[in-house]
Image (tube, rainbow, N blue to C red):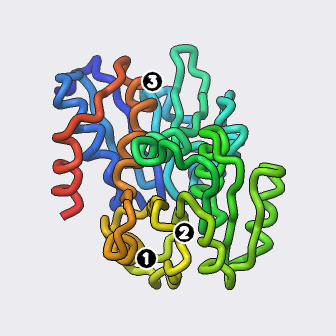
Amino acid sequence: MLSGKGKVAAIIGWPVAHSLSPALHTFWLNYYNIDGAYIPMPVKPEELGEVIRILPKLGIRGFNLTLPHKELVIPFLDYMDEDAKAIGAVNTVLIANDGTIQGMNTDAYGFIRNIQPHIDGKKNKAVVLGAGGAAKAICYGLIKEGYNEILLLNRTQEKAEEMASHFGAHVHVLPWEQRARALDWADLLVNATSLGMEGKEPLDINLDMLPKHAVVTDIVYTPLQTPLLKDAKGRGYLVVDGLGMLIHQAVPGFRAWFGMKPEVMPELRPHLLKALG
């Protein structure tokens, strides 16, 4: 349902056609019979500032950001919440009634909510692969959740070291070549790289040294069962795919834009799997 009084939110990216967020938010809008819409907006990086200045005048309530805009948006914001400041990236924006543009980061929240049911009693040591914006949000979330040691490995070690310096003593860097050996004390293995994603090269890692109690998760959801998760599942590990992170990170934004906290109900996952094809 969409009338002249409907609330409208969007997702901004370049490209943006691949995003599942419109299917996700539209499901909730329909389920709760809310007068509103959520639309994709392909925006080139060099046009981001101009578009953001126009959106409040159009009555847009807010928007999500996907690549490559999560850091580029920061100069155009009036306010950032503590999580966004700590992570240095924004994925959710609210345009307040007074016109101020308020940035949030819900990626850490979404990641932790996705794995939380599976990590009780296993909150000591994590191995995180990758050093991009997603890895930074994940490390931040893990530290807040109580992980006291995080090993970070990235193909470009300098980038990992730069990120680790942001978090101090909680995060330690190892060379990418030691990724298999690094697993021998891990309670949690997180792939926060694009390796294993459709169209990308596979993640080359040997799981022989990973303790049998460890949880393995991948933030990628195309494909839903990445080669890493297939390998781990075949070895008997508990695996968590990336679709839940997408769902949970969307909850705070929907609440901010449309005035109610949506439930993560069982019907939602099959709906998104159908949208994935």
Mark 3: few/some/many CA within 10 Å (<14, 14-19, 20+) = some
* Marks 1 and 2, how far apart at CA: 8 Å
Task: State the residue position of label 1.
Answer: 196
Among the 4 quarters of the image, the one containing residue 259: top left
Asked whether 63 or 143 is in front, the reply is 143
Indicate the amino acid at tag 1: Gly
The location of residue 197, given as percent across then percent down, is 41, 73
Mark 2: few/some/many CA within 10 Å (<14, 14-19, 20+) = many
Q: Which mark is residue 256?
A: 3
Indicate the amino acid at tag 2: Thr
Task: State the residue position of label 2.
Answer: 193
Instruction: Decide which of tag 3 and tag 2 comes sooner along the chain.
Output: 2
The location of residue 272, given as percent across then percent down, is 23, 51
Indicate the amino acid at tag 3: Ala
Looking at the rendered structure, the secondary structure element under dot 2 is loop
Q: Are marks 1 and 2 in contact (CB under 8 Å)?
A: yes
Looking at the rendered structure, the secondary structure element under dot 1 is loop
* Quarter the C terminus occupies: bottom left
Question: Looking at the picture, does residue 42 appear above or below residue 77?
Answer: below
* Marks 3 and 2, how far apart at CA: 29 Å
Mark 1: few/some/many CA within 10 Å (<14, 14-19, 20+) = many
Residue at 49% from the left image edge and 76% from the top image edge: 195
Residue 147 appears in the picture as rendered = yes
The location of residue 274, given as percent across then percent down, is 16, 56
Residue at 32% from the left image edge and 75% from the top image edge: 234
Question: Looking at the picture, does residue 174 appear above or below residue 239?
Answer: below
- The nearer-to-camera label among 3 and 1 is 1
Among the 4 quarters of the image, the one containing residue 114: top left
